[in-house]
Amino acid sequence: MANIKDGKWEDKEGKFVHPDMIRMDKQLEDELVESLVSKAITLQDKMKEYKIYAFAECYAFVDLLRQNYDMERITSKTGAVTIKNFNGTMEVQIQVAKLISFDQKLTLAKEKIDEYLTHKTENMDAEIQTLITRAFDVKNGKVDAKQIIGLKSYNITHPKWKEAMDMIDEATEIAGTKSYIRFKQREGLKLDGVMQTIILDLAALPVEDKEIEEAKNLKAWFSELKKHSAYFMFADNSEEYWRGLYKQGKSIAEAIQNEKDKKQALEDMSNE
């Protein structure tokens, strides 16, 4: 519902208007848009929660293979992970992309390329010249790293061009990495079906590495706690309950003591 104060609706200019002055179609539009956006936000929260969960499960499985089976078969040198079901009709991929940035030497590389273009303008294909120039276009305060690196694929041997490419190499910095997770299955779950990506657009969701790390730590904490299940008094304690103890900073020993204390309290009550 629109922002309402004293029974009046706030408009785009921040003024409050009596609903009798608002056309019914506008009121219905407001109701529809706010309902859809509200549900979209709820869905986004669920997708983000699932994304963190999926990352944590995959990395926990990788750690399990390393610790118990001394296996590295599902990870690549770049940290990418691919896991599949037994018949190969489903798979989960984690891909790790480098985040590339450039220092001030990129400006010098651009100047050197401009010198080359000025020298070669008469004999150069106009389309290629446009592609080279557009590589340095700035969007949202940044150049497109792929287009800049793509310049190195041109088979140009002129000294000025080569000098510019060397400058790009010197200007290139790895600012970090970003992980993407994708889910795939073969069409119709047939062995010879085309492998298709399950479209969720999870890659666009803002998830911090620390959130994934937190989920991994919780899973490890909970797995360790299960080894002491004999101390649990309440078998129906939900995962949310244990997550609450973890977020309180409880150690394994403290969680077990918490269960012991509940058991003792019940025994004391029964003896009264």
Image (spheres, grey):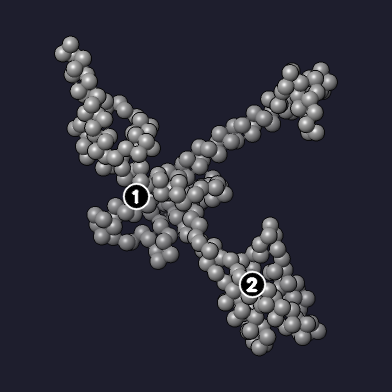
State which quadrant residue 24 falls in.
Answer: top right
Element carrying mark 2: loop
Left or right: 69 as drawn, with respect to 246: left
Q: Amino acid at mark 2?
A: Gln
* Most foreground residue, 261 or 88: 261
Using the rendered image of the protein, determine whether residue 93 is visible from the camera's viewpoint: yes
Q: Residue furthest bottom?
A: 159
**Taking 154 as reference, is 257 above or below it?**
above
Which of the two labelled residues, at mark 1 and mark 2, occupies the earlier sequence position?
1
Query: How far across and how far down the image is residue 14, in percent?
Result: 78, 31
Q: Residues within 10 Å of mark 2 (few under 14, many from 20)?
A: few
Task: Say which amino acid is labelled 1.
Answer: Ala
Residue beneath the point at 56% across and 65% down: 100
Mark 1: give few (<14), some (14-19) or many (20+) Cα within 10 Å.
Answer: some
Asked if residue 239 can be seen in this view, the reply is: no
Q: Which mark is residue 68?
A: none
Looking at the image, the residue that sits furthest to the top is: 272
The residue indicated by pointer 2 is 104
Does dot 1 land on a helix, a strand or a loop?
A: helix
Q: Residue furthest right?
A: 21
- Residue 232 appears at what percent x and percent y? 23, 30
**Residue at which label 1 appears:** 60
Q: Nearer the viewer, residue 91 or 176?
A: 176
Q: In this rendering, is residue 247 above or below 180?
A: above
Residue 18 rendering spot, x and y as whole percentages? 80, 20
Which residue is nearer to you in this view: 33 or 196?
A: 33
Q: Is residue 88 above or below residue 2?
A: below
Residue located at (76% from left, 27% from top): 10
Q: Position of residue 64 (x, y in %)?
A: 29, 52
Q: Are marks 1 and 2 in contact (CB under 8 Å)?
A: no
Is residue 113 placed above or below 84 in the rendered structure?
below
